[in-house]
Amino acid sequence: MKEVLFFVFLLIVTKIQYIYIQHNKEFQQNCFSKQPIMTHREKINQAITQFVKGGDTSDFQLLDKVFHHDFRVTNNGFMGTPGVTIIDKQKYLSNIKEGIFGGLPRTMIIESIDESDTIAMVKLRLESSENHFISYNSLILDTDDEWKLINNLAVVEPKK
């Protein structure tokens, strides 16, 4: 009987030790991973920076990654045309590929980030060699746990 109890005790101790080792490995991997854990605000900043960089360098693949599948640009008085213009994601990416949009480096100032759980609004001021931009950008925390731009509301004015 003592031998059976000792054997059961040994099994329990071994199982506890195994669980401890597994938990400790996961803990060490999370604590010492090479990728730092980013805050929501840092991830929002990263998404906005990628959006601007993608436009500046005409990198439609980067833009495709940072845009939600329902992304839209909304503009009032777009390129001198009266009224509201709405451009969907596919048309925007097509305009980037064709060189209609993008390709000019811009300076970017993030004026504000307003975040609330799974949504955010970012106000940008941009300037290229040709234009001044004021841009209000709506982002959502998507199902893949990445911040994606869903709407860009912009005013673009040529430099004088």
Image: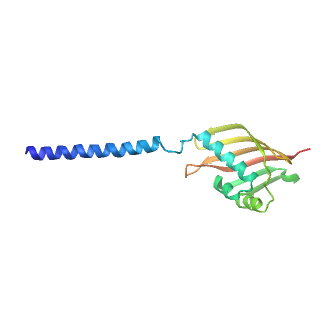
Residue 106: x %, y % from top left = 78, 46
- 36 vs 67, nearest the viewer: 36
Residue 146 position, x and y percent, is 58, 49
Depicted 16 relative to depicted 97: above or below: above
Q: Quadrant of residue 59?
A: bottom right
As displayed, is residue 37 above or below residue 71? above
Q: Position of residue 140 (x, y in %)?
A: 62, 47
**Where on the picture, by quarter, is residue 135?**
top right
Q: Residue at x 89, y 45 (%)?
A: 159
Q: In the figure, residue 61 lies in which quadrant?
A: bottom right
Q: Nearer the viewer, residue 126 or 148?
A: 126
Visible in this render: residue 59?
yes
Whether residue 82 is visible here, answered yes or no, is no
Q: Who's the residue at 33% across and 44% down the image?
A: 21
Left/right of residue 8 with respect to residue 101 in the rendered view = left
Q: Residue at x 53, y 45 (%)?
A: 35
In this rendering, position of residue 91 left or right of residue 65: right
Q: Position of residue 154 (x, y in %)?
A: 78, 47
Which quarter of the figure is the C terminus placed in? top right
Please say which color scheme the image uses: rainbow
Residue farthest toward the right in the current orientation of the protein: 160
Total residue callouts: 0
The quarter in which the N terminus is drawn is top left
Residue at the spot x=58%, y=44% of the render?
118
